[in-house]
Amino acid sequence: DAGVIQSPRHEVTEMGQEVTLRCKPISGHDYLFWYRQTMMRGLELLIYFNNNVPIDDSGMPEDRFSAKMPNASFSTLKIQPSEPRDSAVYFCASSARRGNQPQHFGDGTRLSIL
Amino acid sequence: GEDVEQSLFLSVREGDSSVINCTYTDSSSTYLYWYKQEPGAGLQLLTYIFSNMDMKQDQRLTVLLNKKDKHLSLRIADTQTGDSAIYFCAESIWNTGFQKLVFGTGTRLLVSP
């Protein structure tokens, strides 16, 4: 079984540029989560979807961040305009609907904003 | 509120047992999880325990749950250098009919030869 697939694995860009991170969840999973990990703040939940619908975006830091899930097999997290403090590792995870199913994580996108 | 706490570091020698501790806050959590993160990788599910259990064993891993004290521990027997990683505990929270996980800060385990 293919796991959660994220792209790109690494992204280096200049401040002010638009950044788009991509995620393909595990087939059949109904939940999709976006996390950000930094040394200072640890692992933060940014937003999560159920059946392609955003459920809770209270973790999105500010309006520069947006996330979409146009279909069950694809999600994007966009930062526009990007700032150096957005530098982090961004993880996508997915889980099945039934019961308390564990989340399965992708390998993350390491984002550096210069 | 939602808060999961872990100690930040643990250092052991190869062959010893490691015990990583975690406290959580939501008494209604039905599942509690342990994840492992190796450098440059995502979080990998190690094991989980249902809240009506007090112990679960899986090869070298033993999970102990004390619901009264909201305390969870992960014991790794015969710790190997390959076990060096960050270990996260997480509790499941149901919020308006939807489930999410609340993660601890992670415990960095260093295993020396």
Image (tube, rainbow, N blue to C red):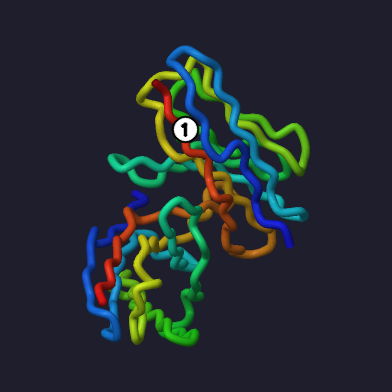
Report the number of discs.
1
**Residue located at (64% from left, 32% from top):** A76
Quarter of the picture holding the N terminus of chain A: bottom right
Q: Residue at x 53, y 54 (%)?
A: B94
> Which quadrant of the figure has residue A86?
top left
Percent from the top left, x then y, of residue B90? 43, 60
Q: Secondary structure at mark 1?
A: strand
* Quadrant of the rendering where the C terminus of chain A is positioned: top left
For residue A89, what is the image quadrant? top left
Give x and y (percent) for residue B10: 23, 67
List x then y, in percent, for residue B80. 36, 78
Q: Nearer the viewer, residue A22 or B3?
A: A22
Q: Residue at x 30, y 61 (%)?
A: B107
Q: Which residue does the numbered mark 1 point to in the structure image?
A: A111
Farthest front residue? Answer: B113
Task: Name the side, left or right, on which B105 lies relative to B10.
Answer: right
The answer to whether A89 is drawn above or below residue A19 in the figure is below
Q: Chain of mark 1?
A: A
Task: Work out whether A110 lies above or below B59.
Answer: above
Residue B99, horizontal then vertical, whole percent:
56, 53
> Would residue B35 appear left or right of A40 to someone viewing this image?
right
Q: Is residue A106 above or below residue B90?
A: above
Q: Amino acid at mark 1?
A: Leu
* In the image: residue A108, left or right of residue B103: right
- Residue at point 45%, 35% (across, down): A59
Query: Callout 1 environment at 10 Å: few (<14), some (14 to 19), or many (20+)?
Result: many
